[in-house]
Image (spheres, rainbow, N blue to C red):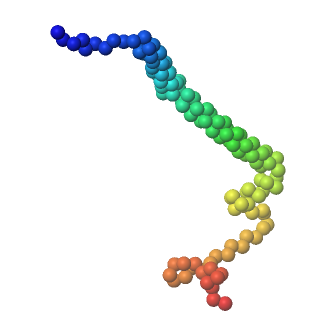
Amino acid sequence: MRPNCKRKVTGSARRSVATRLPMKALIVAGCVCLGYLLFSHSSLLLDFQMRKEAEQLQHDIRRLQETNRGLRLEIDRIQHDPAKLEELARNELGMVREGERVYQFVTPPVPNGNPVSRENAAP
């Protein structure tokens, strides 16, 4: 006769299998849920990125609003302050008042093509 190769399962072995199987199933289910939370189209990582981008955009909006406010003040000054308008006309357009004399100082060209500066000029 052949010896019986089957092992006899005791009560304690059944209990350990019965307690390990639900634990393994719980770990697998937890990993699946964690993977879904981290890598799905509505994941936590995507949510974090979107919040960071929204914060950056809010910062940009505040900065642009400040720039706009400054430009509006400058426009208002140009429209209502004759001194500011005159300043712009003189500086940007090179305009002069009637009767004013304009003196232009031109540096003579040097034979090598570089203009003479005051530091390099002979006394």
Residue 17 relative to residue 50: left or right: left
Residue at 73% from the left image edge and 43% from the top image edge: 66
Residue 33 relative to residue 60: left or right: left
Comparing 60 with 119, the one in front is 60
User: Percent x, y for residue 87?
Assistant: 77, 58
Residue at 68% from the left image edge and 73% from the top image edge: 104
Does residue 40 appear anywhere in the picture? Answer: no
Quadrant of the image containing the N terminus: top left
Comparing 18 with 87, the one in front is 18
User: Percent x, y for residue 89?
Assistant: 73, 57
Image vertical order of residue 40 relative to residue 52, above or below: above
Image vertical order of residue 63 relative to residue 36, above or below: below
User: Percent x, y for residue 116?
Assistant: 60, 81
Does residue 7 appear anywhere in the picture? Answer: yes
Residue at 82% from the left image edge and 52% from the top image edge: 82
Residue at 78% from the left image edge and 62% from the top image edge: 97
Image vertical order of residue 121 relative to residue 91, above or below: below
Q: Residue furthest front?
A: 1
Q: Quadrant of residue 2?
A: top left
Comparing 55 with 10, the one in front is 10
Q: Quadrant of residue 108?
A: bottom right
Quadrant of the image containing the C terminus: bottom right
